[in-house]
Image (cartoon, rainbow, N blue to C red):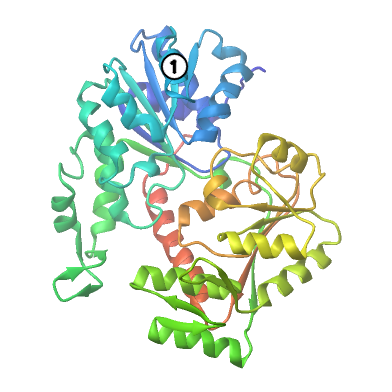
Amino acid sequence: MKFNPHDYQKYAIQFLTQNKAAALLLDMGLGKTVITLTALWELAFDYFDIEKVLIIAPKRVAESTWRSEIEKWEHLSGLTYSIVLGTKQQRENALNQKALLYIINRENVSWLIKNHKWDFDAVVIDELSSFKSNKTERFKALKKVRPYVKRIIGLTGTPAPNSLMDLWAEIYLLDMGKRLGRYIGGFRERFFIPDKRNQQIVFSYKPKDGAEEKIYSLISDICISMKALDHLEMPKLVNNNIAVEMNGKEQKIYDKFKSDMVLSIENKDLDAVNAAALSNKLLQMSNGAVYADDSTTVKIHDRKLDALEDLIEAANGKPLLVAYWYKHDKQRILERFDAAEINTADDIERWNKGEVSIALIHPASAGHGLNLQQGGSTVVWFGLTWSLELYQQLNARLYRQGQKNTVFIHHIITKNTIDENVIKALEKKNVSQNSLIDAVKARLMP
């Protein structure tokens, strides 16, 4: 296929070739992969600036997306690649192949750096936000070899999925601490103050007055952002919250566990040892069931299942993509409805052909790189997630370029439960993230 780049794509390609460290904060659907591959082609064959590139991506994206984009576009002829996946022997064989691009999943980055001589002069991190924690093995490993990298490119649509604190590790991999400091402690002291705490233990931090603007200013020279709405003809998006309510008995069970953090129900014991465990249990109870201490499932209510049934009936055969979080949610949905899971390439093909009317999908397994817009235009969040990144990425499987219908995002929310806190938190994080993206948005000349 012939590549006829939009003006914003030309701008992004030039930005990558002119900056040795760069981040593209690209909204879903703007073609970040072909932009990056085009820039790599130019750097290799026009500028003779790079000889060996490591591309780090989520597993499914590493398996298929980069390969398919290379093979899709005529102008990328000459880009040789090797996919470093599979068993240890398969990965070793892939590394021994002669190629320009070596594509690896992020889980194997630490293995690669520990077991092989580093000879990559360029690195692409697809989904830079997956390196937001400086405590992970993948970050620590890449940090060690970062001084030997001539060029580095970070790609993401969600640079600060949870808080501005996430930016430090991501930006450090780009500039080795030049803009936000060499140590996260210094970054934290410079821009944040303690928020939630228990005596000397600080659980969270919030930005100081003016910190957001200062951080955005510091990173603006190596980051450009583009929103799909600014450059593509996107479908209309409708968000809809569907409230359900437990009866008095069910609400009493929920409230008692929330208050006491322990509960005995149907001869099963529930125990939340800390705030995180409590949040997890309350989310389950909001959905209608909860795991007991012996890992069996205790049913609480069917309110969300009833609401999902109403949505299915109202859809009248129109396909629904249903996002679930817990295995017992999936099981209860499958017991009540004729639904199919989306896990494999065959599942995706069946969905896009319109052969599946109710598809179940887990946000963590389908957040990146899947194009599902041909099969439907309605997402139903049966169970919510605290992760803004997973939330936005899953919605973007349908709300993207090529979608021909209005996209509906339904959230089934149980009243007077933690669901209400989660949806508010997602909205609040989105406001902050939009501020970041707007601050470094590319301004194209008319």
Judge from the rendering whether residue 330 lies leftward or rightward of residue 146; answer left or right. right
Q: Which residue occupies the foreground of this view, 389 or 233?
A: 389
- Residue 45 in view, yes or no: yes
Q: Which residue is mark 1?
A: 101
> In the image, what residue type sits under mark 1?
Leu
Numbered disc total: 1
Q: Which quarter of the picture shows residue 380? A: bottom right
Q: Residues within 10 Å of mark 1 (few under 14, many from 20)?
A: many
Q: Is residue 201 above or below residue 183?
A: below
* Residue 363, image x, y percentages: 55, 52
Residue at (55, 46) in percent of width and height: 365
Residue at 53% x, 55% y: name it: 391
- Is residue 381 visible to us here? no
Q: Position of residue 183 (x, y in %)?
A: 15, 45
Name the side, left or right, on which 334 lies relative to 146.
right
Task: Name the residue furthest bottom.
Answer: 248
> Which structural element holds mark 1?
strand
| Residue drawn at x 67%, y 18% as measured from the top left | 1
Residue 60 pos. (x, y %): 54, 34
- Residue 323 rendering spot, x and y as whole percentages: 62, 57
Q: Is residue 247 left or right of residue 27?
A: right
Q: Nearer the viewer, residue 153 or 355?
A: 355
Q: Is residue 360 above or below residue 267?
A: above
Q: Quadrant of residue 23?
A: top left
Q: Residue at x 50, y 61 (%)?
A: 385
Q: Nearer the viewer, residue 374 or 225?
A: 374
